[in-house]
Amino acid sequence: AQSVTQLDSQVPVFEEAPVELRCNYSSSVSVYLFWYVQYPNQGLQLLLKYLSGSTLVESINGFEAEFNKSQTSFHLRKPSVHISDTAEYFCAVSESSSNTGKLIFGQGTTLQVKP
Amino acid sequence: KAGVTQTPRYLIKTRGQQVTLSCSPISGHRSVSWYQQTPGQGLQFLFEYFSETQRNKGNFPGRFSGRQFSNSRSEMNVSTLELGDSALYLCASSLAGMGSGELFFGEGSRLTVL
């Protein structure tokens, strides 16, 4: 079985400051890793994913995450945040050998960007 | 290309009633998964359907059920509603499950049980 721990429930940060949202996972099998973002009253949108290959993955809007197998982590970072980044962020895993739509999510981190 | 569509968006029921939620996946997607989102438990996997067959199931009581039609549209049903069933129910579709690397989520159906 897998589990995901997001270490911070809320992260307040000023606009243009850097931010890191932490995610650790536990799994006895190989996994895929994801970050999803949820804006108020909306569904989830995929931000970025790690399936294989380079351990550093990037999104089109400036976020990046690094897969660290030894530390079982997949932290999300952005060097300079905008007000529009205010949202809830979810880290998730799925078994890489299992071709199903089952994701295990962390509890979420609310990113609050202040002007 | 239209996204995942869920109906209804909002609904209010009373304890003991039943509810049916509908999900239309992105055209061409054959996998539909359902998730429950609550403030206390977060996002929890309910079940997944692929080609009209339940392929995976989460840890929910039998009151929660679902089905998928030949056009890949899916419905989920909750019978004998309880207060704790109040939640945002999210549907997600993908071409063939996680092998494609991404789930596309709808905006959800918000159920309130009084």
Image (cartoon, grey):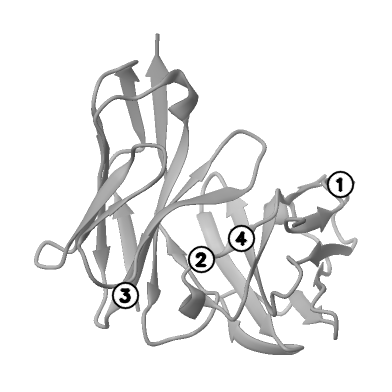
Residue that protrudes farthest toward the left in the picture: A70
The CA span between labels 2 and 4 is 7 Å
Residue at 85 percent across and 86 percent down: it is B70
Do the residues at pointers 3 and 4 share their chain? Answer: no
Residue that numbered label 3 is attached to: A31
Circle 3 chain: A
Residue A40, x across and y down, in percent? 61, 33
Is there any visible trace of residue A21 in the rendered image?
yes
Between tags 1 and 3, which lies in front? Answer: 3
Q: Secondary structure at mark 4?
A: strand
Kindly report which numbered mark, 3 or 2, lies closer to the viewer in this rendering: 2
Q: Position of residue B2 (x, y in %)?
A: 77, 56
Q: Position of residue B8 (x, y in %)?
A: 87, 51
The image quadrant that residue B10 belongs to is top right
**From mark 2 to mark 1, how far is it between C-alphas?**
28 Å
Left or right: where A101 falls relative to B109? left
Query: What amino acid type should be assigned to the residue bearing mark 3?
Result: Val
- Is residue B41 depicted above or below A94 in this figure? above
Identify residue type, mark 2. Glu
Point out which mark residue B102 bears: 2
> Label 4: chain?
B
Q: Quadrant of the N terminus of chain A?
A: bottom left
Residue type pointed to by label 1 = Leu
Towards the viewer: A99 or B62: A99
Residue at image position (88%, 51%) is: B14
* Residue under label 4: B104
Name the residue beneath numbered marker 1: B11
**What residue is drawn where x is 55% and y is 49%?**
A45
